[in-house]
Amino acid sequence: MDTLDDWEPEAPNENDHASPLTMSRKRSVVEREVQHRLPGAKKFTSNLPASNVPTVNAYIPPTLGGAIFCGHLVTDLDSIAGAIGAAELYGGIPARASEVNSETQFALEYWSKEKPEPIEKVLNAFPQAGVCLVDHQQMSQLNKSIPVERIVGVIDHHALQNSTIVTDMPIYIDIRPWGSMSTIIAHSFMMYGRRPTRSTSGMLLCAILSDTLNLQGPTTTEWDKLMVTILSDIAGVIDVQALAMQQFKAKSAELGTLSATALATGDQKIFTFKTDHFEGTVAFAVVETTDDDVILERAQEIRLAMMEDKTKQGVTMLYLAVVNIVKLRTKLLILTENEMALAQAAFVNGRVECPNSMDLGGLVSRKKDFIPAVTRAIKDGFRLPSLVSSHISIKRSVSDVFNLTDEVVGI
């Protein structure tokens, strides 16, 4: 059907004695969003040149030409697709900060893209090249092999925290409050009047779908929706919903084979806080899956791995959010009374299910839901109920990355 509305069953023919049943389905959110914007997107892309030669004089940061584009530690699809897209746009080299996950591997194979080389290898191969960070700008997420003095740019969509990189010289900065860093790269292609290749368009498309939870997550913006429509047209993707389901299935397929440690630390970011009442670090990991029950059945095993990781890293607090990306709901795994106290202060509508678990309902985004809530609670005066809980003992120590952390020394 060519209508923009939801599909409806056909009405029975009153002349038939027994009219056959006609089945149909309701269009998904991403299908409705793409269909709504498709005419405008086609008009836009039809005006793009067939080659990558710019048709107008536009400012293209000279420091990005020939630069190495690299994402954050605990590599995800947005950081890989963004690095590939930025390298194609600016004439540089994509790199990866760590091994890729199953969702990213799916996208690379689907679009016949080579996996970027490890950043350590690329730095050695191009000793004079600058480095542009994509999808991050915090020291805690920076691969340690990257010298800060070689950083020439940042392209990101995350908030600036107090562990943001510090440079001696001005660098190129492009940070926008959009749902995906790959949306920024896609828009930059359009802004410069350049057409990304089909395979790069497909990678950027998959990354936006991943970071915005198929355009249903709270970080989704109109720009994300528009770029998904444009990229799907360039990449020749007729059924965006089917593509999203394939990559989400690939993301979840790996989870069943991962160890508890890999689940607890696989997508973890660390945030540093300092107020008059609280000083320390919060590690917040996220597992996105189409079947959260499979993960939650291993909750006890995963908590043990979380405690070991907390001891190893010496962080003050550590959480793991298990996000169901189909039902858009989250369960938060909690270690001690200190983590529970902060969680209750941050997520006032959360429902405590047991001493080690909280139902966060429809909160699903670390960038939009989890960390802003934690930050507000700490800024509003949160303080630890105790320095020594029933589970662990804590001592103060200096960290290489952070000014001051809480180091766990026993369970």
Image (cartoon, rainbow, N blue to C red):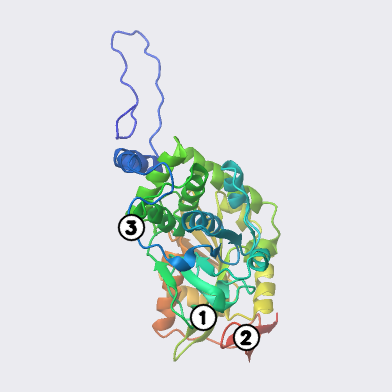
Check if mark 2's residue and mark 1's residue have beta carbons within 8 Å: no
Distance of label 1 from label 3 (alpha carbons): 42 Å
Identify the disc placed on residue 243.
none
Q: Nearer the viewer, residue 82 or 268?
A: 82
In this rendering, the answer to whether 338 lies above or below 297 is below
From the viewer's perspective, is the residue at label 2 or at label 3 nearer? Answer: 3
Identify residue type, mark 2.
Ser
- What residue did someone put label 2 on? 399
- Residue drawn at (40%, 53%) of the image: 189
Q: Give the SS element for disc 2.
A: loop
Is residue 189 in sight in this rendering? yes
- Residue drawn at (38%, 52%) of the image: 54
With 151 as the anchor, is 299 left or right in this view?
right
Q: Position of residue 179 (x, y in %)?
A: 41, 58
**Label 3 neighbour load within 10 Å: few <14, some 14-19, many 20+:** few
In this rendering, the answer to whether 221 lies above or below 133 is above
Distance of label 2 from label 3 (alpha carbons): 47 Å
- What residue did someone put label 1 on? 272
Distance of label 2 from label 1 (alpha carbons): 12 Å
The numbered mark, 2 or 3, whose residue comes first in the sequence reads 3
- Residue drawn at (68%, 78%) of the image: 311
With 129 as the anchor, is 24 left or right in this view?
left
In this rendering, the answer to whether 265 lies above or below 189 is below
Identify residue type, mark 1.
Thr
Q: Position of residue 85 (x, y in %)?
A: 50, 54
Check if mark 1's residue and mark 3's residue have beta carbons within 8 Å: no
Q: Position of residue 316 (x, y in %)?
A: 58, 81
Q: Position of residue 278 (x, y in %)?
A: 49, 87
Q: Nearer the viewer, residue 174 or 391?
A: 174
- What residue did someone put label 3 on? 57
Q: Give the image quarter of residue 22.
A: top left
Quadrant of the rendering where the N terminus is positioned: top left
